[in-house]
Image (spheres, coloured by chain):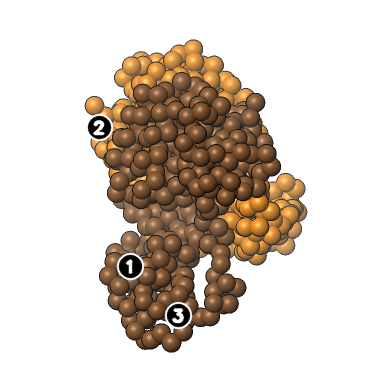
Chain colours: A orange, B brown
Amino acid sequence: MKIRVGIVGYGNLGRGVECALRQTEDMELAAVFTRRAPESVSVKTEGVPVCTTEELPQWKGKLDVLILCGGSATDLPVQTPKYAADFSVVDSFDTHARIPEHFAAVDQAARNAGTVGVISVGWDPGMFSLNRLYASCILPCGKDYTFWGKGVSQGHSDAVRRVEGVKDARQYTIPVEEALEAVRSGKNPELTTRQKHVRECFVVAEPGADLARIEKEICEMPNYFAEYDTTVHFITEEEMKRDHSGIPHGGFVIRTGKTGWDQENSHVIEYSLKLDSNPEFTSSVLVAYARAAVRLQREGQSGCKTVFDIPPAYLSSESSEFLRKNML
Amino acid sequence: MKIRVGIVGYGNLGRGVECALRQTEDMELAAVFTRRAPESVSVKTEGVPVCTTEELPQWKGKLDVLILCGGSATDLPVQTPKYAADFSVVDSFDTHARIPEHFAAVDQAARNAGTVGVISVGWDPGMFSLNRLYASCILPCGKDYTFWGKGVSQGHSDAVRRVEGVKDARQYTIPVEEALEAVRSGKNPELTTRQKHVRECFVVAEPGADLARIEKEICEMPNYFAEYDTTVHFITEEEMKRDHSGIPHGGFVIRTGKTGWDQENSHVIEYSLKLDSNPEFTSSVLVAYARAAVRLQREGQSGCKTVFDIPPAYLSSESSEFLRKNML
């Protein structure tokens, strides 16, 4: 029998999970849960019901895992522990500073219920975290660097949209090539925020707006732009739609380190992602870890897990024998 | 108490393990075991005894894990199952085709003894395998490619040395930049052996040897060079010593894949290594997995494991809380 998956929240991430499930042979979408009126939501997979989140308790025992596709600010801190009381769950909680408390809340709920909750799944946190961990264990005498981009930052795009006179905006975070090269060279540079990334904004202004003032307000915005070199381009609505409707992202995790009796040898470990669609890639990682969550629960495990706790083989639909023979 | 480690075999790999242990705070080298006369071997770590492998049974209970640093052709197929009967063990067995039978032999010995045997640890098999697995689970609709180099291939260097008139030789495997770029572009190219890598040989010839014949014999050597574009450079002994005494290696694992309802979005996952010292990097991976082997055994697990079976957190000397707070 296929693994029965419920999606909670049907935005970009939820739709990405739906697409990713379609690429699996051992998992199937059983239902989509939304806080909106179900009749206003139409899903792509034929025959899949759309339900309200209030109906979730009735699905207990009919789903193997829930993939939670809400936001980290207000949705997941409530939803993940709540739903872990009835289901194994996977989320993409990405507020780094609040991971310890989120872990504790999910762990308690999941242990009490005998379910598995996998949190902070995606690419950062997620695959980038894994690469930081593996690399630091292999090269303890070393230093790691994470660069993000080139990609659209949703939070920064929103911040620009809040500036008076801005009708629409898109912000790209771009790693500085010279900084990447300095890191790869093994020089262990100390890099300031400004030296690591630049920010590029594409803005559609309201008719008659004061462009010089908008540009100044963006570039001087504390926390978001003041610490960076920022470029602002004013474009038309048509250009925005034509050139900036995608949600690309990516980045680099690089660790350089030394080995040898006198640390005479240098090594560079580099992991990078280049993603056409940030939410669809995150969704693909969520689906692989949903498979792992189900396996862990079936083995009798319970509690909160992160990507650090899960043996890589659990992500695969293939047997251990197959993996050893074909991928090792 | 620190994890007590025994090294079996004191060549390049064993010496690398000794150096890597020096960089840890939770592990210590307890003894080195050799098939040579112990008095002919001098180790770098002060106070560490050198023993014969015959003495190993007397060390039962006095070591937490053995790191086996012999060769895959004849040493490890015998040693790993044999020593797994008394100790948890880690090896770098890298004969891909024979992994299933090696796994079975080690698994039986380790299960009977209640020990843990981790096999095929290093970078390929090892870190490259992990990256193939993670990437294929995340992007099931995709294709992966492994490139090796630039680096010294020991087997190919040995093959060149066997050509008549060759006094010394070093062979570098080099990935073809155009092939790498074609893969990264997401074109899913079908690449022949010749299109993926070139081979470059540096040869010191015996005085008076027929250089044209040597070059021809190398380039036409079946299995080793005939399928590749090979370049041969004749150099002096001094140049060999000055420019080619290192053992660098590295390579790339790249997976490209599609997501979206109609597979409309492309993604590139790339992992690469650039290593000054192939054996020292492999040793560093072995030491991290030796730590994991000890933890698994202390938890009551037994049997043969590979990098696919081991939760990433087990490689670290830090607590799970620390890792979640600082690396996730």
Q: Nearer the viewer, residue B75 or B148?
A: B75
Task: Check if mark 1's residue and mark 2's residue have beta carbons within 8 Å.
Answer: no
Residue identifier under label 2: A47
In terms of secondary structure, where does tag 2 sit? Answer: loop
- Asked whether, in this view, residue A128 is left or right of residue A185, the answer is left
Q: What is the x, y in percent for residue B187? A: 35, 63
Up/down of A43 relative to B178, above or below: above
Query: How far apart are the alpha carbons under marks 1 and 3?
Result: 19 Å
Instruction: Kindly identify which residue carries mark 1.
Output: B224
The answer to whether one can see residue A255 in this image is yes
Q: Residues within 10 Å of mark 3 (few under 14, many from 20)?
A: many
Instruction: Identify the disc placed on residue B205.
Output: 3
- Mark 2: amino acid: Gly
Within 10 Å of the Cα at label 1, are there few (<14), some (14-19), or many (20+) other Cα atoms?
some
Position above or below: A215 against B218: above
The one nearer the camera, A297 or A67, is A297
Indicate the position of residue A202 as horizontal and vertical percent values.
Answer: 59, 59
Query: Where's the N terminus of chain A, which quadrant?
Result: top left
* Tag 1 secondary structure: loop
Question: Which subunit holds the residue at mark 1?
Answer: B
Question: Viewed as shown, does residue A21 lie left or right of A93?
Answer: left
Residue in the picture at 56% in, 35% down: B5
Distance between the alpha carbons at the discs numbered 2 and 3: 74 Å
Q: Amino acid at mark 1?
A: Tyr
Q: Is residue B185 visible to us here?
A: no
Residue at the extreme top = A112
Numbered disc in front, either 1 or 3: 3
